[in-house]
Image: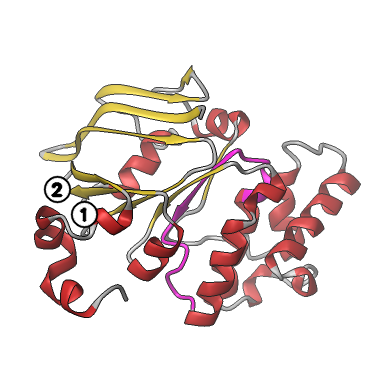
């Protein structure tokens, strides 16, 4: 199985805070890999390092065999890395379709083609009926879905989802799970996710990487990792083990 992402011994310091400390993991083609851990563990920093929003102090990052260490966000996008953000910020003066077109223009430079591709993405997301609505009128859950649609629209091979389930009710969450399983329809072969809802992680992940205070403390199939004493102590707690995934 081809390796699409390699994150090798990467460290990043912000002043006195070591946000990631010698962290290594990989994502293979066809895999869904989640990063989990307590708040402040360094999960979003990992995404920011992969996509060029911050630069590493040490280590190497490779995408599809190409060294992208210290690259710029636009370069990561052009290579085929899409991402969402915890705090969604759609362009509220534009329609839902126009927001997605900002991504589809990357591969479809003609306006009509970009709009048609955006509509395909919105149809996939169950948002086609909202295409002509201003993004300012969307409730939070729909803004989260629009964030995913914009990332899909870039034509990504690897999609990084940063707490995309936050703000969704259980029904909406299950719909997004179904969408993630079908992302191959848009050429997305692999997914990396940051998530706190463990029932989602357990149902989707091929592997999980657990971070705590910037260090990787565990990695493996979710059914094994949740029983790791270090993970229980640092993140899940004994209530999780007593009550099962929530």
Q: Is residue 197 visible?
A: no
Across and down, in percent, residue 24 comes to: 27, 32
Q: Nearer the viewer, residue 34 or 50?
A: 34
Q: CA distance from mark 2 to mark 1?
A: 7 Å
Q: Nearer the viewer, residue 185 or 166?
A: 185
Q: Residue at x 42, y 70 (%)?
A: 166
**Circles 2 and 1: CB atoms closer than 8 Å:** yes
Question: Number of labelled discs?
Answer: 2
* Residue 181 location, quadrant: bottom right
Which residue has dot 2 on it?
A: 213
Q: Nearer the viewer, residue 229 or 124?
A: 229
Which numbered tag is attached to residue 59?
Answer: none
- Boundaries of the magenta span: 152-168
Q: Residue at x 39, y 43 (%)?
A: 47
Which residue has dot 1 on it?
A: 40
* Left or right: 162 as drawn, with respect to 148: left
* Residue 38 location, quadrant: bottom left
Q: Is residue 111 visible?
A: yes
Residue at disc 2, secondary structure: loop
Asked if residue 229 is among those painted magenta in the image, a careful observer would answer no
Asked if residue 162 is among those painted magenta in the image, a careful observer would answer yes
* Left or right: 18 as drawn, with respect to 186: left
Residue at disc 1, secondary structure: loop
Quadrant of the drawing holding the C terminus: bottom left
* Left or right: 36 as drawn, with respect to 202: left
């Amino acid at each position: 199985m081809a390796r699409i992402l390699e994150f090798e011994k990467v460290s990043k310091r912000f002043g006195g805070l070591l946000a990631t400390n010698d962290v290594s993991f990989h994502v293979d083609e066809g895999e869904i890999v989640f990063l989990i851990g307590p708040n402040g563990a360094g999960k979003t920093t990992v995404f920011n390092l992969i996509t060029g929003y911050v630069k590493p102090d040490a280590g190497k990052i490779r995408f599809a065999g190409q060294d992208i260490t210290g690259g710029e966000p636009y370069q990561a996008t052009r290579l085929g890395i899409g991402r969402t953000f915890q705090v969604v910020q759609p362009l509220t003066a534009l329609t839902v379709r126009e927001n997605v077109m900002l991504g589809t223009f990357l591969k479809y430079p003609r306006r009509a083609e970009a709009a048609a591709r955006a509509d395909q993405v919105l149809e996939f997301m169950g948002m086609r009926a909202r295409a002509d609505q201003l993004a300012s009128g969307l409730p939070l859950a729909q803004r989260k879905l629009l964030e995913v649609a914009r990332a899909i629209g870039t034509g990504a091979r690897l999609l990084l989802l940063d707490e995309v389930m936050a703000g969704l009710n259980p029904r909406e969450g299950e719909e997004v799970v179904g969408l993630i399983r079908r992302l191959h329809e848009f050429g997305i072969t692999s997914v990396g996710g940051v998530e706190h809802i463990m029932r989602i992680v357990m149902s989707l992940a091929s592997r999980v990487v657990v971070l705590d205070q910037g260090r990787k403390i565990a990695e493996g199939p979710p059914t094994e990792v949740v029983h790791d004493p270090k993970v229980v102590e640092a993140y899940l707690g004994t209530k999780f083990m007593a009550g099962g995934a929530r």
